[in-house]
Image (spheres, helix red, strand yellow):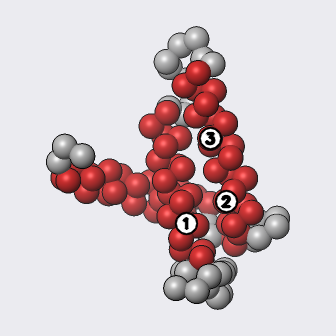
Amino acid sequence: MKDSKYLDDILMELKVTMVQKHQDYGPMNIARAPGGPMNGLLVRMHDKMARLEHLKFHRKTDTPNYESIEDTLKDLANYAIIGLMVQRGQWEGVSEPRVSL
């Protein structure tokens, strides 16, 4: 890491993105995912990883139609954060922690 200020900037970008998407989707798309919230997150993260692989290794151009590599990485980071919130019982619609803290 060159400068921890950039970490703060990235964390703020992740927060803004999470809040915006939470307003669009709400909490129940995670809490009521088929197979449970962690399964839903696993599927979403798998889709993002497949997208990242496609964008990085299979596209002939560096300009995707809709979602950039950076957007995909932000989504992956936020899904990981949501996973922590689910595990700790801090995601709306998930009442109990999923693991011992």
Q: CA distance from mark 3 to mark 1?
A: 16 Å
Q: CA distance from mark 1 to mark 2?
A: 8 Å
Amino acid under label 3? Met
Q: Is residue 9 left or right of residue 37?
A: left
Which numbered marker is on residue 42?
none
Which of the 4 image quadrants contains residue 86? Answer: bottom right
Which of the 4 image quadrants contains residue 16? Answer: bottom left
User: Image point 32% across, 57% down: which residue?
Assistant: 12
Among the two numbered marks 1 and 2 on one chain, the one whose residue lies closer to the N terminus: 2
Q: Is residue 52 visible?
A: yes
Q: Is residue 35 above or below residue 47?
A: below
Q: CA distance from mark 2 to mark 3?
A: 12 Å
Which numbered marker is on residue 41?
2
**Which one is in front, 65 or 43?**
43
Q: Secondary structure at mark 3?
A: helix
**Is mark 1 in CB contact (under 8 Å) with mark 2?**
yes
Q: Position of residue 28 (x, y in %)?
A: 69, 70
Among the two numbered marks 2 and 3 on one chain, the one whose residue lies closer to the N terminus: 2
Q: Residues within 10 Å of mark 3 (few under 14, many from 20)?
A: some
**Is mark 2 in CB contact (under 8 Å) with mark 3?**
no
User: Image point 39% across, 60% down: which residue?
Assistant: 15
Q: Residues within 10 Å of mark 1 (few under 14, many from 20)?
A: many
Q: Is residue 45 above or below residue 34?
A: above
Q: Position of residue 11 (x, y in %)?
A: 34, 57
Q: Secondary structure at mark 2?
A: helix
User: Image point 58% across, 21% down: which residue?
Assistant: 57
Write down the residue under mark 1.
82
